[in-house]
Amino acid sequence: MKPTIVLVHGAFAESASWGGVLGALVSAGHPVIAASNPLRNLDADAASIGDLIRTIEGPVVLVGHAYGGAVITNVPPDAGDLIALVYVAGFAPDPGESCISLIGRFPGSTLRDALRAVPRGDGTTDLLIYHERFHEQFCGDVPDDVGERMAVTQRPVTREAVSAPSGERPLWRELPSWFVMGEQDRTIPAELHRFMADRAAAQGTVEIPGASHAVAVSQPEATAKLILEAARQSMATRQSTN
């Protein structure tokens, strides 16, 4: 049985952001689900993905972009037959770390200055990237028309979600992980990506020269290749130990 690949988008994006990688994953015979990440609350968002995984039979590879990386890190370990994690320009926090605290750990992120806050009636605050800053900040290596479409369709994340401390049982400490990152990521600096990958003892790390934070959009072939490699290696390891 081929593992199901569950794709979890991050802040300022949507499920359709995985469109470029889907063809390669499906062509390789994998069931694929591009999950809708609520972007409201880290614990609740992780629980939501966990609930989805509980409906899946067989092994699962979890893939997270940006804040989606923090979400997959916090998915309950018993949610299903989880075999691998892939961080696509994604956060891999340790217990107590938040996305906001991590981007301050190394120089290079310009995200804070690009954010627009929108207070909500429920007491939370939505964060969006200013329209005029979106292309440069988020996806500088995609064509202008694609960047414009991504800016218009961006989904907000709450400040509370990206400020929330990660839980006490990060999945990357229990499962093999792979990382793909953009050298020109203005949201999560490459130095931070390398730090998180090293800390997780990543099975594979791909750094793409000139690539932005939106690597799944601008570099779908490289992204899909790493996801497929993670699935293949994880299944081979499982079969060799059974």
Image (cartoon, rainbow, N blue to C red):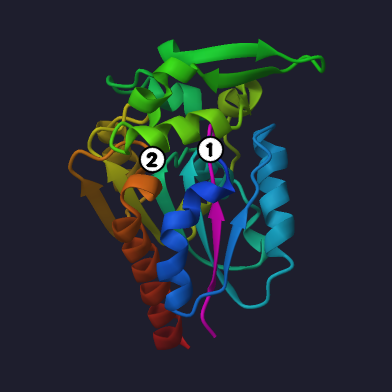
Q: Residue at x 45, y 42 (%)?
A: 92
Q: Residues within 10 Å of mark 1 (few under 14, many from 20)?
A: many
Quadrant hosting residue 156: top right
Task: Check residue 3 for magenta coloring.
Answer: yes
Closer to the camera in the image, 238 or 218: 218
Q: Could you say whether the residue bearing mark 2 is in a helix, strand or loop? A: loop
Q: Residue at x 23, y 47 (%)?
A: 207
Closer to the camera in the image, 90 or 199: 90
- Magenta region, residue range: 1-12
Is 178 situated left or right of 44 in this image?
left
Residue 117 makes an appearance in the image: yes
Quadrant hosting residue 163: top right
Q: Could you say whether the residue bearing mark 1 is in a helix, strand or loop? A: loop
Q: Which residue is mark 2?
A: 214
Q: Residue at x 51, y 75 (%)?
A: 30
Q: Which residue is mark 1?
A: 13
Q: What quarter of the picture does the N terminus occupy?
A: bottom right
Q: Residue 140 in the image: x percent, y percent?
A: 31, 31
Quadrant hosting residue 144: top left
User: Tag 2 or tag 1, which sits nearer the N-term?
Assistant: 1
Q: Residue at x 53, y 53 (%)?
A: 171
Q: Is residue 232 above or below residue 42?
A: below
Q: Are marks 1 and 2 in contact (CB under 8 Å)?
A: yes
Residue 96 makes an appearance in the image: no
